Amino acid sequence: MIQLICPPYNATVDTVDPPLNLLVLGAALIDAGYAVCLTDLALRYSGTSHFDEAALHDIAQLIIHKPSRVLGFTAMCGNYSIALRIAEECKRLDPDRIIIFGGPHASFVAEETLTWFPSIDYIVIGEGELTLPELITALESGQPLHGVDGLCYRAEGTVHTNPPRAILRNLDDTPFPAFHLIEDLTAYFTTAETRFFPIEAGRGCPFHCSFCSTSTFFSRKYRTKSPARIIAEMRYIREQWGITHFSLTHDNFTVNQKFVRQFCQELLDCSESFTWSCSSRTDHVNQELFEVMMQAGCNGVFFGIESGSQSIQQTIGKKLNLNQAYELLRELHQSGLSCTVSFITGFPEETEEDLNQTLDMIIRLLSIGIADVQLHQLSLFPGTQLYEAEKDRLILDDQLWGGNDMNSDFQISAIEKKWIASYPQIFSNYYTLHAVDTPALHRIRKLYYPLAHSFFRTLYYLNHLAGVSYTRTIEFISARLVMPDAMPQEAELAVMLDELIQGLAPEAGLILKDFLSYEQAVMELMRQNTATADKADMKPVRMMQPHYSIPELKLHSPLPADLQLVEGQEDWIVLVLEHASALEGHGRYVRIMSMDHLSIAILQQMESGYNFETVVHHLSLENPFAASEKEREEWIGRVYDHFYRHQLLIS
């Protein structure tokens, strides 16, 4: 029996995807006549961040307890070291086990791995559906290994690498994934809302970005399965487990618009109620194509923008038109499509101005409502143009041992730290470059998320109105953190932003105070419980008295390029926290409105602890225009009508 093993990875994730690559390899081995079993350590140890020697021993015992002579590991850069540790312990407990590594990272560091890690016997380079069965057959029959394309191995004390395996041209020829190897699919989903399944739609990207190894791994050959094959796999998953949402795995699903349209049409024709997500670029697509995709069930798209600097776009080979990208994302969000947008900092040519342009684009995207905007620090992957150009100028950065999205968040052991320091060719993702200001990048990575998601308007106008750049704001706050190593709370950030604003000229400081006060109020509202038992009670509200009017603050609009300052006026506004179940992905939202003086007086008394009915009753007794009980009741009715009309009361 051949045991396929997925090592642990990313200890903080809420859900773990089924190991689709191992299901595909398992199917190829089964078609070749071999028995296969699956060990998913990522699922078994989800949430575990520390693996000491005892834990490794237990994992190895779990693996070798199964009667499998061959152990096949897949590993990414982030869990490569833990995979090596597990493999070494398996080999120590049973030296006769044959250990094979595969996957993109292993493919690019194959010779180095076999040179320095004797516990690894073979490495499959590139696509493994043909190479792995051929290797097993050769080992069982005693045939020479030099005829197995795409294989790295030892012979007579020397590491050998055979010619590369030709890529699979027709992906429909690959066997149906061995879904039956999954013993309990429900273990992968923590809630019903997370029930989705990855389906391989294709492979390869025709572009050649300098930081990405995908194009090299797949020889820049864009391929897809046929629509009929993809839909057949979807149907199988639905029939077996009742799952109807799918993540279509392909680095660039929309490159071939003709294929995408055909896929969408066949989905519509088959009358299946499938929903799905995919990855795309913002060029070579348009709003009309995404409308077709949404009609066919597409409800989410991942876009890698990488940089908000047009010059860096050219340098890294991404070459997106950022204005066009922003407009497309704005249109897609308005149409209801869930967009995830990713950026990277740390390119060697990146200046502070480039960084600020990236942060500015992130803020603009957040301002139009795109909630999932990611910021990653560059990882130098073997097999990339950037690695080849910079591999002689790498600097070990121990902050990347647990703080980089591309690396695991496991506690790196002493032996792993030694490996990382000794073999930069294998573990280059833990290194940075001489040309990069790594302390500044770490500050940005730490503070970007809480600042940008809670105070994006304040940040935007600090930059555009007051001339305080994003990097300067982050540096200012970082220098004042009471606990530099801990993630700051929103309240702490608000205090420091207020301190920064205090030092600005009055014409800029007043409006920035308004934005900061507004965003603080929104945070406080969002922390409140919106459930109310008495329908006469007020919805959770928050009042503020800005220096500028609502039209001038443009609180409901995307951020403008600039703001024309005019003399402000005394004007109260009220923020109302409401349920918004109809808004996809959001349970609550804040409504902003101007209020009259009577409404403000009522709300102020309610903030002191009185309920709405009591406040209105007392005010009616003080009303000089109510000369009789009937007039007083009519006045109370008008107040109630006023509050209901503005939807300030629970209906």
Image: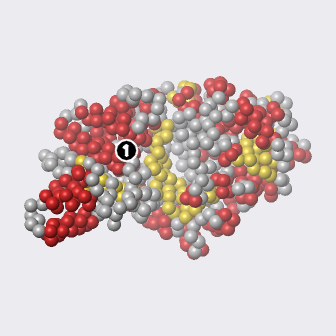
User: Left or right: where does residue 42 sit relative to residue 533?
Assistant: right
What colour scheme governs how the chains and residues are painted in the rendered image of this protein?
secondary structure
Q: Position of residue 493 (x, y in %)?
A: 36, 36
Q: Position of residue 347 (x, y in %)?
A: 47, 35
Q: Amino acid at mark 1?
A: Ser
Identity of the residue drawn at 36% across and 38% down: 491
For residue 347, above or below residue 286: above
User: Left or right: where does residue 629 sit relative to residue 38?
Assistant: left
Question: Foreground: 119 or 640?
Answer: 640
Question: Foreground: 483 or 320?
Answer: 483
Q: Position of residue 341 (x, y in %)?
A: 46, 50
Q: Return the residue found at the far front.
A: 629
Q: Quadrant of residue 469?
A: top left
Using the rendered image of the protein, determine whether residue 503 is visible from the camera's viewpoint: yes
Identity of the residue drawn at 45% across and 50% down: 372
Dot 1 alpha-carbon crowd within 10 angstroms: few under 14, some 14 to 19, many 20 or more: some
Q: Quadrant of residue 243?
A: bottom right
Using the rendered image of the protein, determine whether residue 120 is visible from the camera's viewpoint: no
Give the residue number, with chain letter if any, for mark 1: 454
SS category of the residue bearing label 1: helix
Identity of the residue drawn at 58% across and 56% down: 191
Identity of the residue drawn at 34% across and 43% down: 455
Question: Foreground: 442 or 494?
Answer: 494
For residue 354, above or below residue 126: above
Question: Foreground: 649 or 204?
Answer: 649
Quarter occupied by the C terminus: bottom left
